[in-house]
Image (cartoon, grey):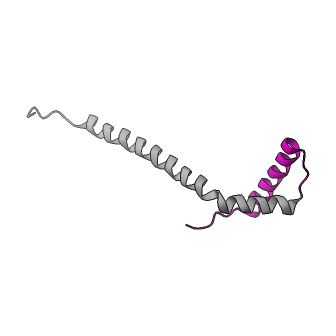
């Protein structure tokens, strides 16, 4: 599986959110480097699980939509009187 990568802008936003979390929830001030290191760690170690769950969620959604579409095709069938 390919590595999960963020744009520089996305990474800056995520680092900022990590820093805010540490400050608010843990009363700890961490720097940009530490927050980025933590982001990289979780992206590498946990990111695949989130990615796979996203794929699974999309698969379930698509399966449900395809079921609905298939039902729609059956509703379009004409009665031929030869059942």
Vertical order, 71 against 45 (above or below) = above
Query: In the drawing, does residue 22 fall left or right of residue 2?
Result: right
Nearest the viewer among 22 and 9 is: 22
Does residue 22 belong to the magenta stretch? yes
Residue ID at (64%, 57%): 47
To which quarter of the image does residue 73 belong?
top left
**Residue at the extreme left:** 82
* Quadrant of the rendering where the C terminus is positioned: top left
Does residue 60 belong to the magenta stretch? no
Nearest the viewer among 41 and 9 is: 41
Query: In the drawing, does residue 77 fall left or right of residue 46?
Result: left
Residue ID at (84%, 42%): 25
- Expressed as whole percent of the image width and height from the top left, the position of residue 7 reads 72, 63
- Expressed as whole percent of the image width and height from the top left, the position of residue 44 reads 67, 63
- Expressed as whole percent of the image width and height from the top left, the position of residue 11 reads 76, 59
Nearest the viewer among 35 and 76 is: 35
Residue ID at (67%, 64%): 5
**Residue at the extreme bottom:** 2
Total marks drawn? 0
- Expressed as whole percent of the image width and height from the top left, the position of residue 2 reads 58, 68
Nearest the viewer among 23 and 67 is: 23
Vertical order, 80 against 44 (above or below) = above
To which quarter of the image does residue 70 belong?
top left
Residue ID at (82%, 46%): 21
Magenta stretch?
1-30
Vertical order, 3 against 22 (above or below) = below
- Please identify the dominant SS of the magenta region: helix
* Quadrant of the rendering where the N terminus is positioned: bottom right
């Amino acid at each position: 599986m390919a590595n999960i990568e963020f744009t520089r802008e996305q990474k800056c936003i995520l680092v900022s959110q990590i820093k805010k979390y540490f400050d608010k929830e843990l009363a700890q001030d961490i720097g940009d480097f530490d927050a980025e290191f933590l982001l990289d760690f979780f992206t590498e170690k946990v990111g695949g699980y989130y990615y796979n769950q996203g794929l699974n969620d999309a698969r379930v959604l698509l399966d449900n939509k395809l079921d609905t579409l298939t039902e729609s095709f059956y509703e379009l069938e004409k009665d031929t009187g030869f059942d």
